[in-house]
């Protein structure tokens, strides 16, 4: 599904964020990537979404080498990869329904289809009755679920969660983690980047440890151990 | 799907326009000023050209024959002049007609009329009024006449030389055009900067939405196009306002064209109407290019898609 082959990412003049990284992620896998600040986790996410280009090496997603992907092909890649962030990135002047619908509108989906799909996704994330609310009227956990719903709207093969529980309390963090696991059970590959020990330990899936731009540990059914 | 996306692009553009309403007003104002300066130059050009053409038409050479020259001899001279390539038109005024015209011109001068009545013979000779193809042909025609065998028939040659006046008008017109051009270039430069800044602010105002659009895989053209559409909208509205200002202005100046510039048969409003597409179509194209160029630079710099 996802292959990082000998990836190096150097930010000018000479900051190596990722060093000779090789990592394979299979379809439908749930992988937690952990490490200290500056280990290169976020850079890895950016390389996967083509927000950054590797200095050398290859990134292959779904059999397609995205290392030298053209600018006009990036949107297509991003529709196959859903991403949620710590800060939710919802639009405060739009309702929950409109926030999720926006992701479809900007990809040219017809209004009738949007009216069908959005309620379905809201149901998956457990917010069927909150469609008319605004983000600021929801709790942090609910907002993150909306962000996940938006990330799922194109039925991506991969869902990346970059510190999704960073702004949440323990209870909400657990809900989010459970939701990610549920999404993974539906067949979506999930990559979780997290500092949260409790979250990672609760999942008991594959854990990849990064340090200084390299993978230093890669264990199945592992715990948070830096 | 494409049609839906295009409609949405227009909707996003409209939203951005309203969100930065006062900035939009400023941008439209600057573009309108640019277009008004262009149209002022067009008006001056049109009036200047017409005035000069009228003056050119009034330039001619009048050849006055001696009273004893017969009509046959005068017609001989006429035939000779009509063979010259430089001559455009010839008007022959017979002795009798010349006398009648003279009497008409001095109808209120009783002394002259009384003196004429006392004469037995017509004191005036026939007249040939010569119009040349070009202004520069007149000296040549006069020179040819001077050197010809017919010179002995000629009492006097009168060259109504408005050439100096035309040269002055040309110079004045040229100076005004130059000033106008400088004003246009200045306004265009300011308009380019204003549009650039407005789009930059629009990108900043919409940064959250743009970020989400990039995140969810919106096509690049759909991210960029609302800003381009917005800049075109500024140009279109500015042109509409310009037209709304120009036509009343033309109605105001039209009466003065007849009075002060002797442009009796010229209607500047009709001129603008019959050349509407060329005049305003060219301006629309120009303003779209300017807005497109300016906003493209802003997008490339600040949007990063």
Image (tube, rainbow, N blue to C red):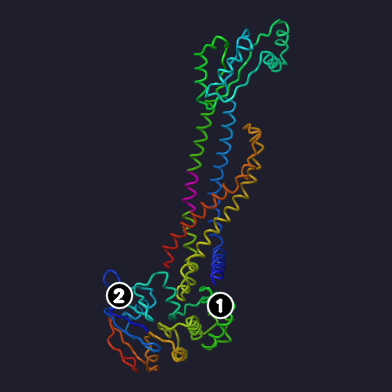
Q: Main secondary structure of the magenta part?
A: helix
Where is A52 relative to B250, above or below? below
Is residue B190 one of those drawn in magenta? yes
Residue B81 rendering spot, x and y as whole percentages = 56, 19
Marked residue chain, label 1: A
Label 1 vs 2, first from the N-terminus: 2
Q: In which quarter of the image is residue B95?
A: top right
Q: Percent x, y for residue B15?
A: 56, 67
Q: What element carries label 2?
A: strand
Write down the chain letter for disc 2: A
Please determine whether, in this image, residue B251 is positioned above or below residue A199. Answer: above
Q: In which quarter of the image is the C terminus of chain A?
A: bottom left
Question: Quick check: A185 above or below A91?
Answer: below
- Residue B46: percent from the left, percent from the top? 57, 39
- Residue at horizontal 52%, vertical 24%? B85
Mark 1 — residue?
A98
Badge 1 element = helix
Label 1, label 2: how far apart the Cα atoms are? 37 Å
Q: How crowded is mark 1: few (under 14 residues within 10 Å), some or many (20 or more)?
A: some
Say which mark, if any, is on residue B173: none
What is the magenta range? B182-191
Q: Residues within 10 Å of mark 2 (few under 14, many from 20)?
A: many
Q: Which of B57 and B154 is in front in this view?
A: B154
Label placed on residue A9: 2
**x, y percent for residue B244:** 63, 50
Image quadrant for the N terminus of chain A? bottom left
């Amino acid at each position: 599904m996802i292959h990082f082959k000998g990836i190096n990412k150097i930010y000018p003049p000479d900051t190596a964020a990722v060093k000779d990284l090789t990592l394979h992620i299979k379809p439908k896998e749930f992988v937690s990537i952990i490490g200290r600040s500056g280990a290169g986790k976020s850079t890895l996410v950016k390389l996967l979404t083509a927000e950054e280009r590797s200095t050398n090496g290859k990134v292959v997603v779904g059999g397609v080498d995205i290392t030298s992907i053209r600018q006009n092909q990036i949107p297509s890649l991003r529709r196959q990869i859903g991403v949620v962030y710590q800060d939710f990135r919802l639009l405060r002047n739009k309702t929950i329904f409109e926030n999720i619908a926006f992701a479809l509108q900007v990809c040219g989906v017809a209004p009738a289809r949007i009216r069908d799909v959005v309620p379905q996704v809201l149901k998956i994330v457990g917010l069927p009755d909150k469609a008319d609310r605004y983000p600021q009227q929801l709790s942090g956990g609910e907002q993150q679920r909306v962000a996940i719903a938006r990330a799922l709207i194109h039925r991506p093969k991969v869902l990346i969660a970059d510190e999704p529980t960073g702004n949440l309390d323990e209870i909400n963090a657990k809900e989010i983690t459970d939701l990610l696991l549920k999404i993974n059970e539906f067949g979506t590959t999930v990559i979780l980047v997290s500092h949260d020990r409790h979250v990672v330990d609760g999942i008991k899936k594959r854990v990849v440890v990064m340090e200084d731009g390299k993978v230093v540990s890669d264990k199945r059914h592992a715990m948070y151990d830096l | 799907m494409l049609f839906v996306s295009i409609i949405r692009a227009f909707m996003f553009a409209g939203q951005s326009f309203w969100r930065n309403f006062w900035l939009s007003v400023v941008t439209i104002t600057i573009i309108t000023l640019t277009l008004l300066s262009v149209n002022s130059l067009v008006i001056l050009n049109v009036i200047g050209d017409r005035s000069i053409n009228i003056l050119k038409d009034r330039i001619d050479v009048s050849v006055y024959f001696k009273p004893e020259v017969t009509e046959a001899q005068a017609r001989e001279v006429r035939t000779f002049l009509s063979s010259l390539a430089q001559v455009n038109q010839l008007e022959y005024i017979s002795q009798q007609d010349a006398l009648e015209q003279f009497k008409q011109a001095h109808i209120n001068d009783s002394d002259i009329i009384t003196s004429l009545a006392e004469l037995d013979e017509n004191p005036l000779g026939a007249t040939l009024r010569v119009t040349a193809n070009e202004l520069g042909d007149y000296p040549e025609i006069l020179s040819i006449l001077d050197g010809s065998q017919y010179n002995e028939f000629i009492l006097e040659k009168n060259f109504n030389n408005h050439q100096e006046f035309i040269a002055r008008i040309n110079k004045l017109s040229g100076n005004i055009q130059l000033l106008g051009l400088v004003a246009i270039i200045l306004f265009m430069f300011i308009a380019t900067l204003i549009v650039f800044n407005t789009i930059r602010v629009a990108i900043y105002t919409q940064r959250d939405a743009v970020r989400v659009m990039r995140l969810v895989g919106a096509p690049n053209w759909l991210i960029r196009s609302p800003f381009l559409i917005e800049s075109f909208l500024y140009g279109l509205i500015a042109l509409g306002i310009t037209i709304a200002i120009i036509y009343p202005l033309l109605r105001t100046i039209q009466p003065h064209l007849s009075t002060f510039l002797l442009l009796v048969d010229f209607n500047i409003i009709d001129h603008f109407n019959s050349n509407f597409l060329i005049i305003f179509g060219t301006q629309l194209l120009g303003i779209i290019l300017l807005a497109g160029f300016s906003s493209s630079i802003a997008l490339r710099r600040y949007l990063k898609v």
